[in-house]
Amino acid sequence: MALKKKISKKAVKKSAPKKSNQLEDSLIELIKNTSAVLPDDVQKVILQALAREEKHTTAEYAMNIIKANIELAKKKSQPLCQDTGTVLFYVNHPVGLDQIEFTKWIHKAVVKSTKLGYLRQNSVDSLSGANSGTNIGPGHPSIHFHQHKKKNIEIRLMLKGGGCENVGAQYSLPYTPLDAGRDLDGVRKVILDAVLKAQGRGCGPGVLGVCIGGDRGAGYIESKEQLLRFLDDKNSNKDLAQLETEIVNTSNKLGIGPMGFGGKTTLLGCKIGVQNRLPASFFVSISYMCWAYRRQGIELGTNKQIKKWLY
Amino acid sequence: MKKLNYPFSHEQVKELKVGDMVLITGKLFTGRDAVHKRLHDGVKPPVNLQNQIIYHCGPVILQDKKTGKYQVTAAGPTTSIREEPYEADVMRDYGIVGVIGKGGMGPKTLKGCKDYGCVYFHAVGGAAQVLAEKINSVEAVHWLDLGSPEAIWELSVTDFPVVVTMDAHGNSLHADVQASSEAEFKKVL
């Protein structure tokens, strides 16, 4: 909480001059903080995981380095991880926002943040291999607009590194190799299979965002949006709430541990959402988020200054 | 906690075992995808890699405009498995004593470690700031034509923290954890 107050004070101070650049300034501040500071709910579970590991093990050693890295990045206001990941914006806005104009400001802020070193040059042409150097290109950054009935604008940002994105998975039920049927037990089996297959390669201990249902595209999008939830919230669907807890507990019994070194914490959390499906389809889409779970959000004030931090 | 100090030797690293937590002091050469491919293609390395360590890392480097000096601002490991087709041959052909990376490597590299007296060191993925702090200076850069993240950066390090996850005696923590977690998985199915 103390941290949030400090940041908002800084942002308010900065907001005084150049009115026209206020939105850009607020977005850059959001990017900088997302890249350098883990939100409180994530830090909390990491510290709990550290306390759980046995002393003098490689698992405890890894968690201690992770803890030190979180503190150092915050102190130096530098990227937690050199892979600043896919830049994912989620903008909730009232009816009538000019999304084209808003997108331009997001692009400007991303270019500037890249120049300032808050983001690595991370956007590569898939055919030529050329790096745009700006983090701008087809699909980059990824921006999701949602209209809402409220009057304010909320911008959430997630930076998701390549290592963890690579271990995401999508299953189509029934899934014969595991005898996983079209029910919650089948869902449970394939989620655990994804955790097993990831081993330590997703920079665990990680957090899963899961979507049951949807088409293939919508399933993955929803699985990432699940990662916008607070880690300590409770799923309003009782069955899903139970499944979330069960996935975390069972995954931690697998003993994969931090970095795959073996240990007590394999997962820090699991968030599951649901969408309708076609009678013929039953997808389970899983996004794995590394321990460097960089997500933050801001609510904009009337002058586009940062009114409130959302995490 | 064990220490590994420069100059490195195959005899030294052969004494290391899976699970050892090691602090490395001395010199590291970064090398990732493009470097491995080029070495594997038989291009002569710009430096003698005999008894050296290759670090799978694409660092973020800033150059001071006035002095021209390089500074490393973020330097965590990258996923090693992409070098699986090349690493054992690089061990054989260039005499390195080990590699540092993340995520572990496969059976070909494990056999390479055994055959050529090398180890695989695992650095903590994502710990870019802690690891950059252990780098004292950039001594030189080679093959900059590959682009900054892919170039060979010669780094001087102190107490660089790693864990041995594949040793020179055929042991792999990754293979062990894979097997034990698979066994547990079968129980919870």
Image (spheres, coloured by chain):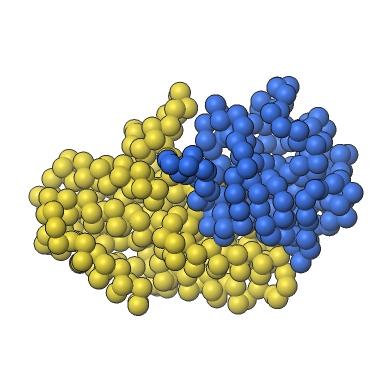
x, y percent for residue B63: 47, 42
Q: Which chain is blue?
A: B
What tint does the image give chain A?
A: yellow
Q: Is residue A176 left or right of residue A294?
A: right
Residue at horizontal 61 percent and vertical 69 percent from the top: A64
Residue at horizontal 38 percent and vertical 32 percent from the top: A132
Quadrant of the image containing the N terminus of chain A: bottom left
* Image: B67 above or below A228: above
x, y percent for residue A95: 12, 53
* Image: B36 above or below A188: above
Q: Can residue A183 be seen in this snapshot?
A: no
In the rendered image, which quarter is residue A37 located in? Answer: bottom left
Q: Can residue A43 be seen in this snapshot?
A: yes
Farthest residue to the front: give it: B67
Q: Nearer the viewer, residue B22 or A158?
A: B22
x, y percent for residue B155: 64, 46
How many numbered discs, if any?
0
x, y percent for residue A97: 13, 49
Quadrant of the image containing the C terminus of chain A: bottom left
Residue at horizontal 69 percent and vertical 60 percent from the top: B159
Residue at horizontal 60 percent and vertical 77 percent from the top: A51
